[in-house]
Amino acid sequence: MLAAARAAYLTETRRESGWQPLAAFNLGWALVLTGESDAAIAPLQHAVALAPRHEQWIVAADAHCILAKATLVAGDLAEADRWIDEALDLARTHGIADLPHVGYYHVIRGALHARRGELEPADRAIGLGLQQLRGHTESLLIAEALLEAALVRRALGAGPEARAMLTEARTVIESCPDPGILAERVEDVARRLTTAHVRASPGSVLTERELEVLRLLAQGRTKREVAAMLFVSYSTIHSHTKSIYRKLDGTSRDQVLDHARDLGLIESA
């Protein structure tokens, strides 16, 4: 798939044909599917630039969406936010918001919420996207939506639902001849759910403030530094830290951070 996409992109670029925006998008999408998100950004930006000239609004909106995914994978949340907002705006403006595959835009919006620890908005957005995607023939989009939904459901304490979503996603992925990076992704989510099932207890979901403290601690900040950065007292941060340790079942910072990475609350070191 990737080799064919590269060849088509080179051919259409040389010809400067009307197929060039679609070829650029297909190459970017193929790179994302194989886990090469950084390399995908250039052809996707090329598609974004070219598609409006040919009034190819579906290609333009889709390219914005996949750019949001690529920049989200890279950890640039601000850029991901911008791209997905523009994708949704294009979809609404050009009358394509109800197409089944546009549900994936909402999944990416939900994944962005999840990365910020905004679990309830994430759950709503991914749920909306998954419902819309059910009418689409591209099963890998549904599988990815299920994996994102499973992680959010797990974080919200709905373990059985999360595991059911994982099972459905695995069935879809195993039926695909070339699932790309999703073959690894499903195993990663399975490990996270297993770890969460063992370690997480009722009431273990961190508050937004606790997530903020956790991420600063993960940067190596001391509790006094965190207090200064958040403009609160040391005793407040000490209380938050104790709560984090209890909820994540840890007795040391390293142990708590390891558990947090397993649960997807912070990025892997």
Image (cartoon, helix red, strand yellow):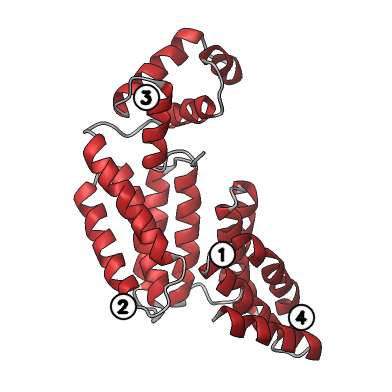
In front of the other: label 3 or label 2? 2
Q: Is residue 265 shown above or below 47?
A: above
Residue flagged by tag 1: what amino acid is it? Leu
Label 2: element kind: loop
Query: In the picture, which quadrant includes the N terminus?
Result: bottom right
Residue flagged by tag 4: what amino acid is it? Arg
Q: Earlier in the sequence, mark 2 or mark 1?
A: 1
Counting from the top left corner in percent of width and height, residue 95 is at: 55, 77
Residues at marks 1 and 4 touching, judged by CB atoms closer than 8 Å:
no
Residue at 58% across / 48% down in the picture?
A: 75
In front of the other: label 2 or label 4? 2
In front of the other: label 1 or label 3? 3
List the residue tagged with mark 4. 53
Label 3, label 2: how far apart the Cα atoms are? 40 Å
Q: Residues within 10 Å of mark 4 (few under 14, many from 20)?
A: few
Q: Is residue 93 left or right of residue 103?
A: right
Q: Is residue 82 left or right of residue 17?
A: left
Which of the pair 139/220 is nearer the observer?
220
Q: Is residue 50 left or right of residue 161?
A: right
Q: Is residue 253 shown above or below 65?
A: above
List the residue tagged with mark 2. 175
Counting from the top left corner in percent of width and height, residue 126 is at: 40, 58
Label 1, label 3: how far apart the Cα atoms are? 36 Å
Residues at marks 4 and 3 touching, judged by CB atoms closer than 8 Å:
no
Label 2, label 4: how far apart the Cα atoms are? 38 Å
Asked whether residue 172 is in view, the answer is: yes
List the residue tagged with mark 3. 244
List the residue tagged with mark 1. 88
Which of the pair 1/138 is nearer the observer?
1
Asked whether residue 128 is in view, the answer is: no
Residue at 58% across / 15% down in the picture?
A: 225
